[in-house]
Image: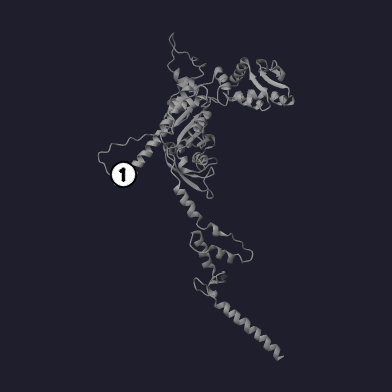
Amino acid sequence: MSDFYENDFTGLSETGEEKHKTEERRCSRCGRPVSECGPLTDLPDGTSLCSDCLKKTLDAAKNNAPFDLNSLFQGLGNLPGVQFLNLGDLQGLGRAAKKKKQEEPEKRFSMDEILPPHKIKAQLDRYVIGQERAKKMMSVAVYNHYKRIIEEQRRADQAKKKAEERISDPNEPDIVEIQKSNILMIGPTGSGKTYLVQTMARLLDVPLALTDATSLTEAGYIGDDIESVVSKLLAAADNDVEKAEHGIIFIDEIDKIAKKKNVNSRDVSGEAVQQGLLKLLEGAEVEVPVGASSKNAMVPMQTVNTKNILFICGGAFPNLENIIKERLTRKSSIGFQADLKDRFDDDRNLLQKVTVEDLRKFGMIPEFLGRLPIVFSLEALTEDMMVRILMEPKNAILTQYQALLAMDEVRLSFEEDALRAIARKAMEKDTGARALRSIIEEFMLDIMYEIPKDDSIGEVVITREYVEHTGGPRILLRGQL
C-alpha cells in the first residue's frame, strides 16, 4: 500500500514540475510568459513565438523583411492540418518586378515612324473602295494628332533639360498649344465606317478599342459605365498605360445616345451619356477598372490620361436626311423659281450636306459636338462601287472564296454579268457592303457542298443565271482545261 501511494504521489509531483515549467516558458521575442500571451509556437532554430509575435513576423514577410522564410515555414509546417508554401524563392520578387518595370523604355513617337497623309491614304486605298474624301480627312486628322504627340514629347524633354540645368530664358517665345481633333463619322449602314477605323489602326500599329454606345448608361444604372471605353483600350494595349494613352477609341452607334424626345422617364442612356463623355473627349485623368466594365472592390484600378487618345465616333443617324431636307427646302415658295419639296428625295448622298445645327436637332448636345471638330459623311455605295468591293480590295470577298476552293484544287471565276447581278441584289437589300457576303453565301452553298464529292471538277464559273436562280453554274472538268 505504501508503495502504491508513493508511486502515485511521485507521478503527480513530476507532472506538477512539468506544468510549472510550461507556465514559466516565455516568448523569445516579447518575453511575455505563457499565462499572458497564450500557447507558443516552437521554431526549428530553438525559438518560441507567441501568436502576436508570429503575426508580426508574417507581416514582415510581406514587406520583404530580411529573415529566413524557409526556417519559419518549416516550423509552421509541423502544425497539424496546416500547409504552407515555400516562399523562400519568392522573397524579393516584388522588388525585382518593380525594378524591371522602371527600366522599361518609354514609348516614344518620331516623325520617321508616322506616315504622311498621302501614304496613309495610299495604304487605305488597298483595303477600302471609294470614300475618297473620308479617307483624305481621316489621314490628315490622324497625322496631325500624332504630330501633336511628338511636339508634346519634345516640349517635355526641353522642360526637363532646362529644369536640370536651371536655365531660365525670359525672352522665350510663347508656346503654341495644339488642341486635339476628335472625329465624327456619319454614314449609312454598311458604308465602311468600322472597317475604315480598323484598317487605320492596323496600319499605324497602335492599340484600338471598338466599343458600342448602346451599352453605355449613366453612372449608377445597369449597363457599362462611361469609363468602360477606356478600360477596353487598356485591355487592347495589354494593360500598358503608356501604350494605351496613345491609342484610338472608336465609339460606334453614337447616334443612339441622342436626347430622347417626349420621354417622361429619366434619360439614363441619352443626354446623360453625352455629358459623361465630355471629360474623356476633352482629356482627363480617369480611373478605369482593369479587366472589367464596371468598378467594384474586387477589381484593380488604373489611372489613364485621355489627353492624347484619339476618339473617333461613328453612326448611321437614321432620319437625319429628313432634318437636312427640311433645312434645305425651308425657303420654298410658290412660283416658277421655288424649290420643290421633293427635290432631294432621290439624293443618296444627302448626308454630305449635314451641318452642326442638323446634328443638334437630331439630339446631340452642343458641348458634345464642340469636342468633335472634324465632321464628315461617307458616301452611299453605288452599284459600281459594289462590283469593285467584290474584286479589288486586298482581302476581297471573291478572293476569299477562290482561296477556299483552291484548297480542293478547283478554280473559281465569275462572269461580269454575274458580278453586276450580285451588286444589284445587294443594292435592293439596302444594307451596304454587308449584303454582299450574305448573297454570295446563299448561292455558293451548293457549290461548296457538291465539289468535294467529285475529284474530276477543275473549274466552276458563276453565271448571271445562277445568281438570279434561273440557271446553273458552268462546270469544267480537269480534262477540259
Can you say which quadrant of the picture contains the N terminus?
A: bottom right
> Foreground residue, 334 or 356?
356
What is the three-letter code of the residue carrying label 1? Lys
Q: How many callouts does the rendering have?
A: 1
Image location (x, y in percent) of residue 427: 58, 19
Packing grade of label 1 (10 A; few <14, some 14-19, many >=20) is: few
- In this rendering, the answer to whether 28 lies above or below 457 is below
State the residue at coordinates (63%, 24%). 402
Rendered image quadrant of residue 89: bottom right
Residue at the far top in the pictured view: 336
Near-viewer residue (299 or 404): 404
Which residue extends farthest bottom?
2
**Residue reaching furthest to the right:** 453
Relative horizontal placement of residue 465, taking residue 365 as reference (left or right): right
Residue 110, compared with residue 124, is above or below; it is below
The way the protein has been coloured in the rendering is one colour
Q: Is residue 325 left or right of residue 151?
A: right
Please determine whether, in this image, residue 437 is positioned above or below residue 294: above
Instruction: Using residue 112 as the reference point, say whether residue 433 is left or right of it.
Output: right
Confirm whether residue 423 shows in the render. yes
In the rendered image, the quadrant that contains the C terminus is top right
> Horizontal and vertical percent for residue 432?
56, 23
Tag 1's secondary structure?
Answer: helix
Measured as percent of width and height from the top left, residue 331 is found at 42, 16
Note whether residue 259 is visible: no
**Is residue 378 depicted above or below 296 in this figure?**
above
Please name the residue that numbered disc 1 is placed on: 162
